Amino acid sequence: MQERETRVDGLRTRYLEEGEGPVLLLLHGALIGSSADVWERTMGPLAAAGLRVVALDRPGYGGTDIPPVDNIDYQRKFVGMFMNALGLGPVCMVGHSQSGQIAVRLAIEEPNRVSRAIILGTASLLPPNPDAKTPPAAVEEGTTSEPTVEDIRRLTGAQLYHQELLTPEVLQQRLALAVGKNFEAFTRRRETPAPPRPAGETPLWRQVGEHAESFFLIYGREDRPDTDRRCQLAREMFPGLRLAVLDHCKHIVQWDAADEFVRLTVPFALEGAAAPVS
């Protein structure tokens, strides 16, 4: 695995790369301390299966600079600019958590560049639970002051089934990526209102169902209390949608179920690379 750097939209941008073949572009989530390093334990097996695996530090995370404007729309545009900088496309994209929204929009809006996408643990891309009496609570992504190692243990541990994965080395790595300029970036994102969606826009979870052939959704059974219920609704509403629910797995699917993630990802990505681009 090689650590590389390029410039995208004027920002110093860090990414990891391994292997040769059809491109699999990995996007991490929004939890403070997140970076391309969240994919380290799966990049080798994915590359060994015949894929060129590229994992990006999103703007304001890891070793990538803070953008002047930071919201989900900019993050999506940045991914497209990163692909341009590396000459990537078409790719299969994997979006974890918040990045699932980025992957879905790019796959729907630019299918010639993102041929298909794998979504890991993005709750907003499942149909809402009709039995819920209150909206689901937002996942805690960070802290109000620079985090300590115990904050990182608490926040990351809440998203993991296998707590033994939180080794001292992992905690220190994530802490180093959660302070300084990355905490400044987190604070800016938290204080920036989400961009409004166009009036009458079809909900993104429904758009996923309408383009079911482009997506594979993977969730941890222990992620949220209503994960099973909402996944069952998705299967009933969109029979052609590929969807897997993994046991003994919470939100960080690529850690809790690393082997299963690789097993499911490889054929879907290779199949997409072999299919004609529409």
Image: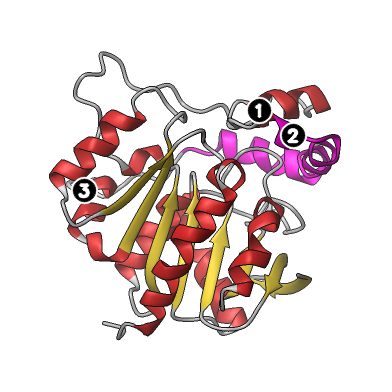
Residue 160 lies left or right of residue 247; in this view the side is: right
> Quarter-wise, where is residue 110 in the image?
bottom left
Query: Which x, y percent locates residue 108?
Result: 30, 65
Query: Which x, y percent locates residue 78?
Result: 55, 65
Query: In terms of sequence position, does the residue under pointer 1 or pointer 2 come before the other?
Result: 1
The amino acid marked with disc number 2 is Leu
How much space separates mark 1 and mark 3, taking CA atoms?
Answer: 31 Å
For disc 2, the neighbor class at 10 Å (few under 14, some 14 to 19, many from 20) is: some
The residue where tag 1 is placed is 157
* Picture layout, residue 242 above or below residue 233: below
For disc 1, the neighbor class at 10 Å (few under 14, some 14 to 19, many from 20) is: some
The amino acid marked with disc number 3 is Arg
Q: Nearer the viewer, residue 87 or 241?
A: 241
Residue 205 lies left or right of residue 272; in this view the side is: left
- Is residue 165 highlighted in magenta? yes
The residue where tag 2 is placed is 166
How much space separates mark 1 and mark 2, taking CA atoms?
Answer: 7 Å
Rendered-image quadrant of the N terminus:
bottom right
For disc 3, the neighbor class at 10 Å (few under 14, some 14 to 19, many from 20) is: some
The residue where tag 3 is placed is 206
Does the rendering let one see residue 76? no
Q: Which residues are magenta?
A: 164-193
